Amino acid sequence: MKSDAKTVDEYLQALPPDRRASISALREVILAHLPEGYEERFYCGMIGYVVPHSLYPAGYPCDPKQPLGYACLGSQKNHMAIYLMNVYGDPATEAWFRKAWQATGKKLDMGKSCVRFKKLEDVPLDVIGQVIARTPVNKYIAAVEKAMAARKKKDG
């Protein structure tokens, strides 16, 4: 769902109470495990966790005016979602994440980076905390730069 919010607090206040409670609980887990260097802000119409331009001036490769996104948390029309770019961009992290989620016995509804859920009870919060903590900002930047260099090489 497109939000007209300008801040994280405005975004949360605009959510229905049940979704606000779920998104807020997941946000607390993310903030508790977010490695140093990443910042929370309203980003791409959701709650975003980014590498600020002060640490990575190049920004998001597709739109350098935007900071480099690490994760997002949002309420969509038919579900809530967490977007995990470190899972999307790293096959080892993706394999770990899928195995850790499966070990909880909860059903994983996942696209490339998007983990969809209908209620908070569907999400193993400890796994989310661990995957958020898994990638320090310098390692994430290095992985993005490596991927972009490989892409440039491939594109010729």
Image (cartoon, rainbow, N blue to C red):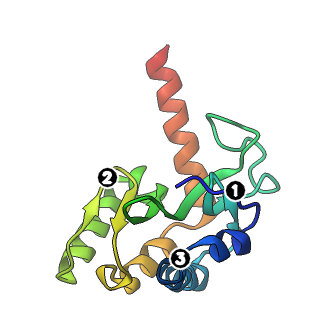
x then y, percent, for residue 93: 36, 62
Q: Give the camera-side residue of 17 and 92.
A: 17
**Which of the two labelled residues, at mark 2 and mark 1, occupies the earlier sequence position?**
1
Where is mark 2, residue-wise?
111
x then y, percent, for residue 53: 79, 51
Left or right: 6 with respect to 137? right
**Which of the two labelled residues, at mark 2 and mark 3, occupies the earlier sequence position?**
3
Is disc 1 placed on a helix, strand or loop? loop
Where is mark 3, residue-wise?
16
Where is mark 1, residue-wise?
4
- Dot 1 alpha-carbon crowd within 10 angstroms: few under 14, some 14 to 19, many 20 or more: few
Residue at point 39% right, 86% down? 126
* Labelled pair 2, 3 in contact (Cβ < 8 Å): no
Give amino acid for label 1.
Answer: Asp
- Dot 2 alpha-carbon crowd within 10 angstroms: few under 14, some 14 to 19, many 20 or more: few
Of tags 2 and 3, which is closer to the observer? 3
- Whole-Å distance between the Cαs marked 2 and 3? 25 Å
| Above or below: residue 133 compared with residue 42 | below
| Above or below: residue 41 compared with residue 133 | above
Is disc 3 placed on a helix, strand or loop? loop
**Which of the two labelled residues, at mark 3 and mark 1, occupies the earlier sequence position?**
1
Left or right: 55 with respect to 15? right
